[in-house]
Amino acid sequence: MALDNTDVKQKILIADDSEINRALLIDILGDGFEFAEAADGVEAVDILQNGYADISLVLLDIHMPRLDGFGVLEAMNKRGWIDDTPVIIISADSDSDFAQRAYNLGVTDYIRRPFDAYVVRRRVQNTLMLYEKQKKLMGLVAEQVYELQKNNSMMINILSHIVEFQNEESGPHIQHIRIITEILLKGLCELYPRYQFSQAEIALIGTASALHDIGKVSIPSAILNKPGRLTPEEFAVMKTHSAIGASMLDVLPIYKDEPLVKTAYQICRWHHERYDGRGYPDGLKGDEIPIAAQVVSLADVYDALTSERVYKKAIPHKEAIRMIKNGECGAFNPILMNVLDKVADEIYGELHGATSESYDDDLRKITAEILQKNSISSSGRTVSLLERERKKYMFFASMSDEVMFELSYTPYLLTFLNGGGKRLGVSETIVPDPMNSGELHECCGEDKLKEISALLHAATPENSIIRCEGDIKIDGDVRHCKLVAQAMWSSGAEPELIGAIGKIYRAD
Amino acid sequence: MTVREFYDVIGGNYADTLSRFLSEERMKRFALKFEADPSFSDLCAALEAKDADEAFRAAHTLKGVCQNLGFDCLYRPAFRVTEILRSGDLNVGADMDELRTCYGVVMSAVRALRESDS
């Protein structure tokens, strides 16, 4: 982030319980950076909590009072900060178990004591550069994927248009087939979880669909463009286009084994098969027909019906859907009929509203998927958005008369927002091991803490709000207060209690 | 007192520290800072209170600081005391005595270094 804007210094968080060690690191790294200092793990988490987007790098000691370096790393993992904030461990311990545990928790590098000024400086610079580079590379890769995809699609489109040109069919047919194919596939995955196509696979089948009629280049144009009905002989010739198209791909000297070509082969050869086995060229039946070919076949029929041809007028969308479902235009897989039902409106909307190319959209989806797979949870932009949300939240919290708090179980920390803790007589914003905090015992009594803890542990994801009330010390007096909190659960098949957020307010 | 003389008096490693710190000025500045470092008194207090965890952390910090500053004479007993305390054992006897002696030597040398300055 900061390298893009040379005016802004990158900020390094130094967490080490020795003041001398922190001062030494700051001195070694020099005034090219800004620094935040933490004397223990709780302070480090506090600083990250209050603006981790500003921190470009964390230098982390392991042995610290209250919360150690591993505790900080656990918090950084839990909250996803570790994904885009590099951490370098500073430690004298050469224990390899330590190093392994730290690396498993997402640490980037290790600096051993005694500090060597040159080594420290280079490690820090390299790590910052690497992260900066990684961010830039991610951008570059996305751009190149986009360019490649665009060029590929362009070549395929040109090729298909040659076929269409000879075919004198409507221009946008290829585009339409691709759009409809992708919508159907998406709907298929949503409705029938046994079909699991990734965004990239859907885009691939969409691209391959453009080649479905390439075999038509070998059909004499007298037959191809005959305005009237074809004779049985002419129809027999016409029908050869699917097998010819497939064999054109099959004899390709290279790309034959590429997923795109393999998929295109299926589509070319079998997009005139019928689910009841009465199609051509192979008379495949039911699920013997690859799903990509089934979907393109349906897309082809829909677009043919709703487009104007030399020999026919365009049929309205609703009527076309009705005819297909009624079995007037071929026999299709019943599950595809259900999918068509579900996505019919979307198909109509896409074909009539959006005429522009959807490469951007594809790319966005594919990129999002890659990012998700690699669990890079937040781009710089998301981070700053979250940051803004957080500031907004903090502002409202400061305007409120309520004491707001956040509880996390690993690491076991209770955090008060905007000075709420002070009102309860708690001196720190973050309270490690709250159940055993003397100040909290003083405030509401140990039994109350146990009661709240029991309520939280009895909560379920369906029933996650807990309430209780009692007399507690607030603003220097004992008052009757109420507490309401929402238990927080991990995502996944078996949600696990990870903490809670809540507020305490005076009931008098 | 020069920085080199200071390191000689306390049995520190002048050459290695200079190669790591890259400047004698920085060595001096941080040697003087050692006077205010609380880890030794933290260690004594924790031993007094028989708090093995806290004693370990303080010893560990003292060891790390000495290692960084190249105070080898003090680093060696601090290392041994840290390892004893790591296992939760509060019996630091002879090693702690050596640590105390070395700490005294370092502190008086630091004062001499500061005074020779003014």
Image (cartoon, coloured by chain):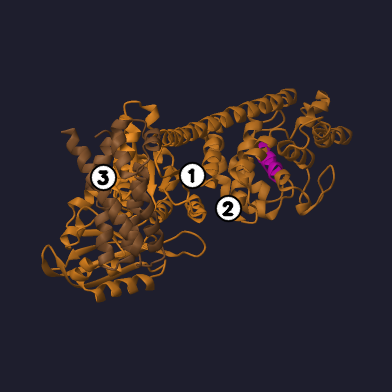
Chain colours: A orange, B brown
Q: Which of A126 and A281 is in front in this view?
A: A126
Say which element carries label 2: helix
Q: Which residue position is annotated with label 3?
A: B34
Residue drawn 81% across and 45% down?
Answer: A279
Q: Local crowd at mark 1 within 10 Å, few (<14), some, or many (≥20)?
A: some
Magenta stretch: give its range: A295-304
Q: Is residue A195 on the magenta stretch?
A: no
Of marks 3 and 2, the one in the foreground: 3
Q: Would residue A146 appear left or right of A158 to someone viewing this image?
A: left
Please, what is the three-letter code of the amino acid marked with disc 2? Glu
Q: Would residue A312 appear left or right of A142 to someone viewing this image?
A: right
Of marks 3 and 1, the one in the foreground: 3
Q: In which quarter of the image is the C terminus of chain B?
A: top left
Say which element carries label 3: helix
Vertical position of residue A211 compared to residue A93: above or below: above
Q: Which of A344 and A233 is in front in this view?
A: A344
Q: Residue A190: which disc?
A: 2
Q: Which residue position is annotated with label 1?
A: A376
